[in-house]
Image (cartoon, grey):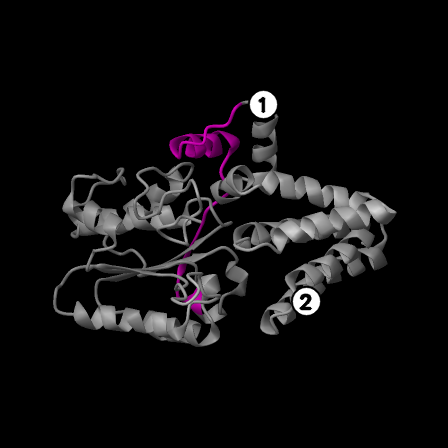
């Protein structure tokens, strides 16, 4: 993670400062046209996989609205932020009085992000609206991501969405909208973003200073990242490609060789400051098990398909218990890897 902001991956740019968005022109056109009518929805649920540009889109539209506060006179398209404008500078520096970005807070003791957006964070939204109630300006809240809201925080957001203040706009970002409270989803207009095409992903990486080389690395990144810039950066800058290779070795080997491979992989994943790559591995493992379950189902072996699918929930439960009781991460990983190898 960046030394300045633990929310930002190495090699990435904060969505608030990112001048470029790739692959979502239709979504931008929809938002700008909806805003210009003066009848746009007060809450937009931006859905899609992590790392494809949801937050960047939200900040770009926030810039558009704050730069053109009267809808009828706003341009019919969203332009790249003007770095010389006061609105863009304030948004980029986090100093805008009209924009609030809610995300998982950082634990002051550990310097790491907390596991959830708490109700205390949501109360900041109430304070934000009360402070700006007499300005007549647009007030914009970006919830990034709503999947991270704990139950109390989700209920608190729901109350605000049910009775939104005048000239308030909410962007509710979600990687997995099915996990949100149905009542939150019902109060938002959904806007689904698709994973980036290979060309858009390559362009986004080039804009970040990480151009693909056209060789095997490019093929691997395009295949494994699934249209996500975040996944691509984890592959390129966090050793994600090596983790995938080591996992393949661990599940395909037999006897002592398999045990040795699992130990090597578990040592890396259990290391200090390995949270990013640990999360990356868990996503890859889940995808692996789901794929294996699908293969069994398609071949007619429903018992094996059910067993492999159940491993995903078993894995999640083991990790929750290990985290709750501060159990040894390596031993938990060894148990999970052994189950995956035998799946």
Mark 1, residues whose alpha carbon is within 10 Å: few (<14), some, or many (≥20)? few
Numbered circle sitting on residue 117: none
Q: Is residue 341 left or right of residue 8?
A: right
Residue pictured at 70% horizontal, 48% vertical: 264
Q: CA distance from mark 1 to mark 2?
A: 39 Å
Residue pictured at 28% horizontal, 45% vertical: 32
Q: At which x and y percent is residue 313?
A: 68, 64
Q: Which residue is mark 1?
A: 215
Start and end of the magenta stretch?
Answer: 184-213
> Quadrant of the rendered structure where residue 206 is?
top left
Q: Secondary structure at mark 2?
A: helix
In reply to whether residue 139 is colored magenta, the answer given is no
Mark 2, residues whose alpha carbon is within 10 Å: few (<14), some, or many (≥20)? some
Q: Is residue 241 above or below residue 320?
A: above
Q: Is residue 278 above or below residue 223?
A: below
As rendered, which of 142 and 46 lies closer to the eye?
A: 142
As rendered, which of 185 and 202 lies closer to the eye?
A: 202
Q: Is residue 79 left or right of residue 6?
A: left
Q: At which x and y percent is residue 128?
A: 23, 68
Q: At which x and y percent is residue 96?
A: 20, 56
Q: Is residue 71 above or below residue 105?
A: above
Sequence-earlier tag: 1 or 2: 1
Q: At which x and y percent is residue 296?
A: 81, 50
Whether residue 36 is visible, yes or no, is no
Residue pictured at 40% horizontal, 58% vertical: 144
> Quadrant of the rendered structure where residue 162 is?
bottom left
As rendered, which of 103 and 37 lies closer to the eye?
A: 103
Q: Which residue is mark 2?
A: 318
Q: Secondary structure at mark 1?
A: loop
């Amino acid at each position: 993670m960046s030394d300045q902001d633990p929310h930002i991956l190495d090699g990435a740019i904060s969505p608030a400062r990112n001048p470029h968005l790739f692959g979502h022109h239709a979504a931008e056109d929809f938002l700008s046209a909806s805003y210009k009518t003066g009848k746009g929805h007060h809450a937009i649920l931006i859905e899609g996989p992590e790392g494809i540009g949801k937050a960047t889109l939200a900040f770009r539209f926030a810039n558009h609205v704050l730069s053109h506060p009267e809808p009828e006179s706003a341009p019919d398209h969203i332009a790249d932020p003007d770095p010389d404008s006061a609105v863009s500078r304030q948004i980029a520096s986090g100093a805008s009085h009209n924009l609030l970005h809610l995300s998982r807070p950082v634990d002051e003791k550990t310097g790491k992000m907390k596991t959830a957006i708490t109700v205390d964070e949501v109360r900041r939204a109430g304070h934000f609206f009360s402070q700006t109630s007499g300005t007549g300006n647009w007030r914009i809240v970006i919830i990034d991501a709503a999947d991270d809201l704990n139950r109390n925080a989700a209920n608190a957001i729901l109350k605000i969405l049910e009775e939104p203040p005048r000239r308030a706009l909410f962007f509710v970002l979600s990687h997995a909208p099915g996990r949100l409270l149905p009542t939150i989803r019902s109060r938002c207009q959904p806007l689904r973003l698709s994973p980036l095409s290979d060309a858009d992903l390559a362009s986004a990486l080039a804009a970040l200073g990480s151009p693909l080389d056209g060789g095997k690395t490019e093929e691997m990144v395009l295949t494994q990242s699934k249209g996500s810039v975040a996944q691509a950066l984890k592959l390129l800058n966090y050793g994600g490609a090596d983790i995938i290779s080591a996992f393949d070795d661990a599940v395909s080997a037999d006897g002592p060789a398999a045990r040795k491979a699992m130990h090597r992989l578990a040592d890396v994943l259990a290391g200090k400051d390995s949270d990013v790559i640990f999360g990356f591995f868990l996503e890859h493992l889940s995808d692996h098990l789901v794929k294996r379950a699908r293969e069994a189902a398609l071949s007619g072996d429903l018992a094996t398909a059910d067993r492999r699918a159940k491993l995903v929930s078993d894995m999640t439960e083991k990790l929750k218990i290990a985290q709750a009781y501060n159990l040894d991460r390596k031993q938990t990983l060894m148990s999970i890897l052994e189950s995956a190898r035998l799946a």
